[in-house]
Image (cartoon, grey):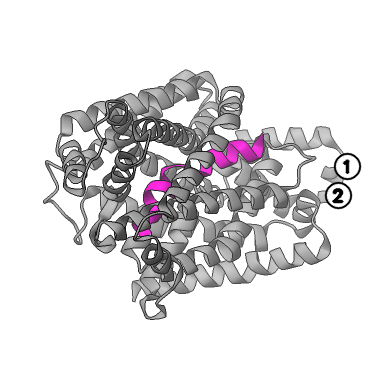
Amino acid sequence: MFIFAATGSAVGLGNIWKFPWMVSESGGGAFVLIYISSVILIALPIMIAEVFIGRHGKQNPVASLQYLSKESSSFDVTEIDGDLNRIKTKKQQYSNSDDYSNWQLVGWGGIIAGIFILSFYSVIAGWTMSYILKAGSGAFNLIDLEGSKMIFANLVADPIKLMGWHTVFMILTCYIVAKGVKGGLEKAVKFLIPGLFLILIALALYSTTLNGFGDGMRYMFVPELSKISPSVVLSAIGMAFFSLSIGMGSLMVYGSYLSNESSIGEVTATVAFADTSVAILAGLIIFPIVFTYNLDPSTAGPGLIFETLPIAFGSMPGGSIIATLFFILLFFAAITSSISLIEPAISFLIERHSMSRAEASIKMGLLTWFLGIGTLLSFNLISDYKLLGMNFFGILDGLTSKIMLPLGGLLMAIFTGYIVKKKIVMDELRMGPIKFNFWLILIKYVAPIAVTLIFVRGLL
């Protein structure tokens, strides 16, 4: 159930909407090569660390980081391990103490990044809800490129419609979170994630019949090494973190629910493989369509899947039904991800400020909804207002995926590799010595050095 819930958190608009868009913007196969490498060598080791922090701390991200830092610096691990009652006593004591460690700021950063991301994620999810109705009404039947572009352009140009869909999506997210996510989310993702995989596989098989399939595959999997730059590498690392929900605190929250009998390494590797598979499948679907209809992938932007997929749906038998199912499943994938984005903030307010789940959900939902207004207006009324060449949406996306998430991941790697006592990590991960030492090298040296070098190079 953890694998389904964490996969539901990770698999969403990031894989199907953002990954193809980032590939098209960042050099095609060069980006894919760096992305997969980043998942294996940087994101997955940090993902293991984040789930470890959550399972060991059993609290919200801020309190778990605070507890672990104090446990590592102040108390004998053997003594605590031998007395379960004392563990509970100390956790409660840390949670209520005003003497917070500096490492709690990493938890705070993850909570803030999650809210920022959800504020624009909700707007894009609103596009998905709108497209469910369009698909069901047969709007994509035999549609051509110009017709598909027109449908999307009309949607994003209308701030009233975008506001409506954004509002509906945030209300649904907050309603589910207010009711409690564990039971309902587990039951839902058990069917939704396999269903989404089946439809993506069917669409990928359809793409093999298109004239542009060969060109699409070359674009995705034959890297032009000359296109690899610090900017592309940082974008790929940021995309890996965004896609796997790393640095947002959500994996710590899910980790706090993970059974002590489960292997953290095995379940996180399974989630990372499933998540990366969905992203690759999305590319296998999108880029053959792009080249079949002579689109320029580098100029398509955030609307890439919304302009290309309707063409495929409109030309296949039963396309309206398949399109409707696809966007419904994409909506549910978006909802499971949105829940994970807001849940760290909710759990913090409940544990630290004794709010009810409903009150915490309403307050954080309103804040996120308000921030989202800037994103939806950046596609129409304030599209000409830019800072450093970016609109409001671009600023939020760049701030989170290129700065906040990699920085949060870097600090978690340092925290787990250098601050937490080695015995605590070994006892919690329960890996064999070879696997553990390999993971330790990645978390102590490879991940921090790689992210730091890219950050420094990007600032020069």
Query: Does residue 164 sit above or below 59 in this rendering?
Result: above
Q: Is residue 6 magenta?
A: yes
Residue 263 appears left or right of 296 = right
Cα distance in 3D space between marks 2 and 1: 6 Å
Q: Residue furthest bottom?
A: 226
Q: Residue drawn at (61%, 28%), measured in percent from left and top?
A: 186
| Residue under numbered circle 2 | 78
Q: Secondary structure at mark 2?
A: helix
Residue flagged by tag 1: what amino acid is it? Gly
Regarding residue 171, the answer to whether it shows in the image is yes
- Residue 94 circle label: none
Residue 248 appears left or right of 210 = right
Q: What predominant SS class does the magenta segment belong to?
A: helix
Residues at discs 2 and 1 in contact (Cβ within 8 Å):
yes
| Residue under numbered circle 1 | 82
Query: Does residue 444 sit above or below 44 in this rendering?
Result: below
Residue range corresponding to the magenta coloring:
1-22
Image spot of residue 272 (x, y percent): 59, 52
Q: Residue drawn at (13%, 44%), measured in percent from left and top?
A: 382
Q: Residue drawn at (42%, 47%), measured in percent from left and top?
A: 16
Q: Secondary structure at mark 1?
A: loop
Residue flagged by tag 2: what amino acid is it? Thr
